[in-house]
Amino acid sequence: MPDTTDADVLVVGAGILGTSLAHHLLLRGAGRVVVVEAETPSAATSGAGAGFVGLWAAGYANFLTDTDLELEQYGIDFYRRLAERTPDIECRTNGNLYLATTESGWTQWVEPVLGHPLAPKGTRQLTPHDIGTVTGGVVAPGSVVGGALHPGGIQISAGRATRALAASVRELGGEIRERTRVTGLIVSDGAVIGALTDTGLIRARRVVLACGAWSNELLRPLGHRLPLLRMVATRVVSPPSGVPDTMPTVMVPDLYGLWLRAHRSGLTWGNGDGYSPSYELDDAVGTESRPHYPELVDRLRERLLPGLRTLVPEHDLSIDRWLQGIPCMTPDRSFLAGAVPGVPGLYVLGGDNEAGVTHGPGLGRLMAEEIDTGGSDWLDASPYRLDRFEADRFPTERDVADAMPARR
Ligand SMILES: Cc1cc2nc3c(=O)[nH]c(=O)nc-3n(C[C@H](O)[C@H](O)[C@H](O)COP(=O)(O)OP(=O)(O)OC[C@H]3O[C@@H](n4cnc5c(N)ncnc54)[C@H](O)[C@@H]3O)c2cc1C
């Protein structure tokens, strides 16, 4: 016989966004919180995330705002505290480094970081020699023209942090129901009153969809569609080669958005060559948690590896293993955190724009405040409202891609 559960808030999805939200709801005493997860916490995009957590709104990504910057700082402080209780999230407080390999890259990418009005305290310009030193010799000084360091930036294991948050949800009295899929939402008199799962019914007057790339599947029967572009993204892991764990995270925007960091004495890395909008791939997003497109790894190998070898000549860059996930982009590259228009009780936390690890704790807090008290005393959540997009303005994922602002 199917079981019936009562909850004050039902969260669908135990990625970094769903677990962050549930954690903050429980801290606020928002009642019985049940998280339903089709697989296990971090099984989908969050477990593939590279774990860079930085102040991207301070000069690196011009579409991010001062409010986003607050979320970013909250995320950094949150993970630092989480690491004190859960050291295995592998939080490294080594800073975030932005490099240029050309003079035009310097002007376009590094100068805005150095000159940003909200540049964090201690931001400093680095010479090629300094870059060799702070990366422990990983980046060859001769391959770069200079860089900027945000000293307060951190890196974490995104999968482990998600699982640590799931454990915290349980410790705080919440429930996480794993390997259970929400198959439909139940609406009565226009308002959401619960959800059906493959094992039973959950009654809840507040339901939050934090199910990433699968959010529209649950909204479609209600006649709603979020303007999301599902983007398959690849992270490559190279074997141990003596990379020091003191190395800052490295961004090289003029190498088509290269990102690189230490990973258990090897390196993990990727760039735009390992990305593809789902509409360019066959069957891109099924019900599997993680996509599997070896052709994107081949493309990384062919296009990025030669330039990467010049930047990192002394370390093993062979591909030991690789992971893919499906971040969801929005037309303005900002997040979705708010009520679904016209369906009382239903909320969405998503549109992660490939920055959900960084912004997840802050978005989780903001959304918990919204659900608990109808608003936030902390930050103005209106930039993340769902109704900022007119219904049907972006009928296809390609329309979302066309609208998205370039990083600069
Ligand atoms: C290669 C790569 C590198 C990245 N690097 C970074 C980085 O350095 N920094 C950063 O900030 N971000 C990074 N990101 C982005 C980050 O990983 C995402 O923004 C974040 O993981 C999204 O979290 P989520 O909770 O929305 O999604 P998910 O982790 O996908 O969680 C959604 C969950 O919902 C579950 N679900 C779906 N449908 C249902 C259903 N019907 N019923 C029940 N459960 C359901 C899924 O199983 C899944 O676990 C990266 C992503 C990738 C792929």
Image: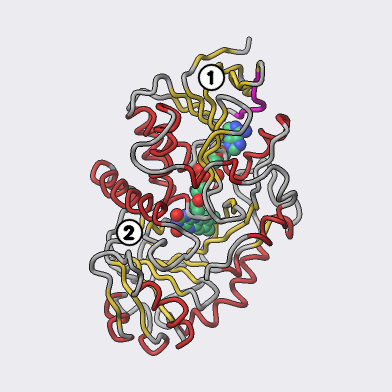
Dot 1 alpha-carbon crowd within 10 angstroms: few under 14, some 14 to 19, many 20 or more? some
In the picture, residue 226 is in which quadrant? top right
As for residue 182 lying within the magenta part, the answer is yes
Residue 266 seen in this snapshot: no
Q: Is residue 184 above or below residue 379?
A: above
Q: Secondary structure at mark 2?
A: strand
Residue 98: x %, y % from top left: 39, 73
Residue 389 or residue 163, whichever sits in front: 389
Q: Position of residue 345 (x, y in %)?
A: 55, 25
Q: Which residue is mark 2?
A: 154
Residue drawn at 44 percent across, 57 percent down: 65
Quadrant that contains the N terminus: top right
Question: Which amino acid, mark 1?
Answer: Arg
Residues shaded magenta: 181-187
Residue 205: assigned label: 1
Q: Which mark is residue 244?
A: none
Q: Disc 2 marks which amino acid?
A: Ile
